[in-house]
Image (tube, rainbow, N blue to C red):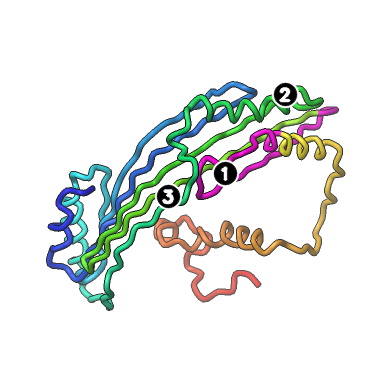
Amino acid sequence: MLDGLDKALEISARFVDITFQERESTSIVTKDGVAKDISLGVTSGFGVRVLDRIWGFASANNPGELLDAVGRAHRAAQAGKKEIAFTPVEGPVDRVKTPVKIEPLDVSLEEKIEFGQRAYNVVKDREHVVSSSFTYFDSKIKGFYASSEGARIESETTKVAFFGGVFAKKNGALQFGSERAGATAGFEYLKDPEAFGVGAADKALRLLDARQAPSGRFKVVLDPLLTGVFIHEALGHAVEADHIIQGESILEGRLGETIAS
């Protein structure tokens, strides 16, 4: 999979590991019954970590650049003055693969395009529906991990997803409803595109007759998962080191302060 792998792992460093991925994917966007955006592609790349005095990292897209990337990571790893503590472990050897019944790569492009058209067909004539968009996606990711401690792990991950969005309009009010589902699974996971269309349209149509939420300050009960998303978006990105170093964080220079309670 990577030429020169053994040589790359045998450099004079305390630890070396290499992670390689190749992704083959399909994306189809169907707008108002017409497949307008179809993307088929294969991408690949790898990352190298080297531990000498400190950690060094390098990456590339071309597998032929492996030894060059290892050299760059090794030079970076020798730049530190203080040695990082590191405990060696025995590297595992394994092969893991997503269990699938129907490989998405074996399904024709025409059948995948039909998914969006089937969803559109159940919403196109519904009263007040003015537009719709449905997206089909699948990917197969082949991965390989190797380390100087003997780890050799091969993986094959298959993912599928389908997203639907419908706009409805009445008396000047415009509302949007959506449905989505995705899984680490095969094509068999996506059984009923019509249900996505009906679900998205029903949501949009219900919202047309929904009461507006009152304005003001209120005590609320939040879903724990949603609360976590709020905190992540408000604070998680703000404490990322690169944002702070670049002066782009609202939390820069506030170490030790109470910022929320």
Query: Does the rendering let one see residue 176?
Result: no
The disc label shown at residue 157, or none: 3
Above or below, 222 relative to 86: above
Using the rendered view, name the quadrant where residue 232 is placed: bottom right
Depth check, front residue: 142 or 59: 142
Secondary structure of residue under mark 2: loop
Q: Nearer the viewer, mark 1 or mark 2?
A: 1
The disc label shown at residue 124, or none: 2
**Residue 196 inside the magenta-drawn segment:** yes
Depth check, front residue: 220 or 200: 200
Amino acid of disc 2: Lys
Which residue is painted at 21% across and 72% down in the image?
Answer: 53
| 57 sits to left or right of 187 | left
**Residue 190 inside the magenta-drawn segment:** yes
Query: Does the rendering let one see residue 20?
Result: yes
Q: Which residues are magenta?
A: 170-197
Which residue is painted at 30% across and 67% down in the image?
Answer: 92
Q: Nearer the viewer, mark 3 or mark 1?
A: 1
Q: CA distance from mark 1 to mark 2?
A: 25 Å
Above or below, 160 relative to 53: above
Q: How many marks?
A: 3
Q: Are marks 1 and 2 in contact (CB under 8 Å)?
A: no
Amino acid of disc 1: Tyr
Depth check, front residue: 67 or 211: 67
Q: Nearer the viewer, mark 2 or mark 3?
A: 3
Residue 68 on image: x %, y %: 16, 50
Secondary structure of residue under mark 1: helix
* Disc 1 packing (10 Å; few <14; some 14–19; many ≥20): some
